[in-house]
């Protein structure tokens, strides 16, 4: 899984003088991960709003002051939790959907999984609703995957779009909006929201309306590698 | 112009006992407007970030403490400035585009104006980039107009969408994303962003790709009633 926020990618075969730095970087990364895991676990139990920094550090088995060696404030930790979740889902999507050959099916199934996952994982859903920074994080973590899938659709003549970057950013801007809506309506109304959103995005990239409707309703390949959170 | 945040819609023909409340409400509304106008003027001169509460109250000719009778914090004032700008642009759009009979042209031209206005008005642009709350405000202020235009497109068989509310929220989620992008690229790249975004949204609501491309490039009716800000 890519971790763009890793402070130091020290490899293990460095010279002796650099080894301690590598170990320190590794330890830092481990502590940071423990803080993120602790925050996620606590928020899953009690909701995003009801978890304080002291509990998070206690759960991660570090002193309260240590928190601020890793994050400026609670918001920055929330963003890290979201980023971690996006990376996990992104990797799982790549592994599970690589049998789909039609770029339109690949794009639609990826988006449907992202909507379904947000309804399934209350931490992610809650974070997306609260975070103003959700769009930049989605663009940073999942943007390259979406861009790759969209380019594949353009190259194969499946999609008609003028600007792949605009299509990518509009996809994630819409995704956050659609997830906000799915989380605010009742369960019945949210049930086929993933299909309706995927059909919208297929039309947006130039797939004819009737075909977009049909593709958005194909049986969704399961994501087997995604750990239950 | 609709002002959804007006605290009291006291009419002038109330009984004598209620008249003072009407006057107080009017005075409150006037002071609130002065604070918003002062903030907008100062931010236009110096950028969104470089204006403090003390300067805003001074510009509005009220005491510093008065600020907190109207707004919880600076963020809430920024949201009020954005809401006010959206209302102004929304009313201007309604007046200027009412000669367009094709719902697809109406939808495309409205969206193009919203992108162009964000590039023209640095306060609005800056607020949209910074505000996490941008999407809810857009939905509240301009959502009903977009919904009305989308329903017209459905009724006339011009648009193919399953859920008008999903299409509305995706339109504004994408709009914020597209404006963020237009503000971050160089001026040449941003030049036809309004057309590309409008074409994307026309495709999203089911207009065939070639037709969406053509409609997004029609001469844009000018908005004459919009005051220079």
Image (cartoon, coloured by chain):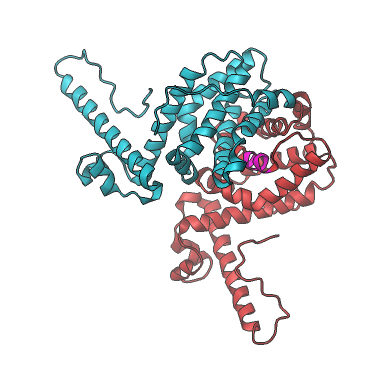
Chain colours: A red, B cyan
Determine the residue positioned at 74% across, 31% down: A206
User: Where residue B227 sits in the image (x, y, percent)?
Assistant: 39, 28
Horizontal side, residue B207 vs residue B185: left or right: right
Residue B160, position in %: x, y? 68, 21
* Quadrant where the C terminus of chain B is found in the figure: top left
Determine which quarter of the picture holds residue B76.
top left
Does residue A40 show up magenta in the picture?
no
Residue B174 spot, x, y in % from top left: 59, 36
Residue at the image position 55 percent from the left and 31 percent from the top: A185
Residue projecting furthest to the front: B188
Q: Position of residue A81 (x, y in %)?
A: 57, 56
Return the residue nearer the eye: A2 or A163.
Answer: A163
Q: Tell me if residue A221 comes above or below residue A54 in the rendering.
A: above
Residue range highlighted in magenta: A165-172
Q: In which quarter of the view is residue A218 placed?
A: top right
Q: Residue furthest bottom?
A: A16
């Amino acid at each position: 899984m890519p971790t763009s926020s890793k402070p130091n990618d020290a490899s293990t075969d460095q010279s002796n003088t650099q080894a301690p730095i590598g170990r320190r970087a590794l330890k830092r990364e481990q502590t940071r991960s423990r803080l993120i895991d602790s925050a996620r676990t606590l928020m899953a139990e009690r909701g995003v709003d009801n978890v304080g920094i002291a509990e998070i550090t206690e759960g991660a088995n570090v002193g309260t002051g240590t928190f601020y060696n890793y994050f400026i404030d609670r918001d920055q930790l929330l963003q890290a939790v979201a980023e971690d979740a996006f990376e996990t889902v992104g990797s799982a999507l790549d592994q599970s959907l690589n049998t789909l050959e039609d770029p339109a099916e690949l794009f639609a199934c990826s988006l449907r999984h992202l909507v379904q996952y947000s309804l399934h994982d209350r931490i992610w859903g809650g974070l997306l609703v609260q975070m103003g920074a959700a769009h930049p994080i989605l663009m940073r973590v999942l943007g390259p995957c979406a861009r790759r899938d969209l380019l594949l659709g353009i190259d194969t003549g499946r999609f008609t779009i003028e600007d792949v970057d605009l299509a990518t950013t509009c996809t994630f801007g819409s995704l956050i909006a659609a997830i906000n809506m799915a989380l605010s309506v009742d369960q019945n109304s949210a049930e086929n929201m993933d299909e309706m959103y995927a059909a919208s995005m297929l039309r947006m990239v130039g797939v004819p309306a009737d075909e977009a409707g049909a593709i958005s309703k194909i049986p969704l390949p399961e994501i087997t590698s995604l750990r239950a959170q």
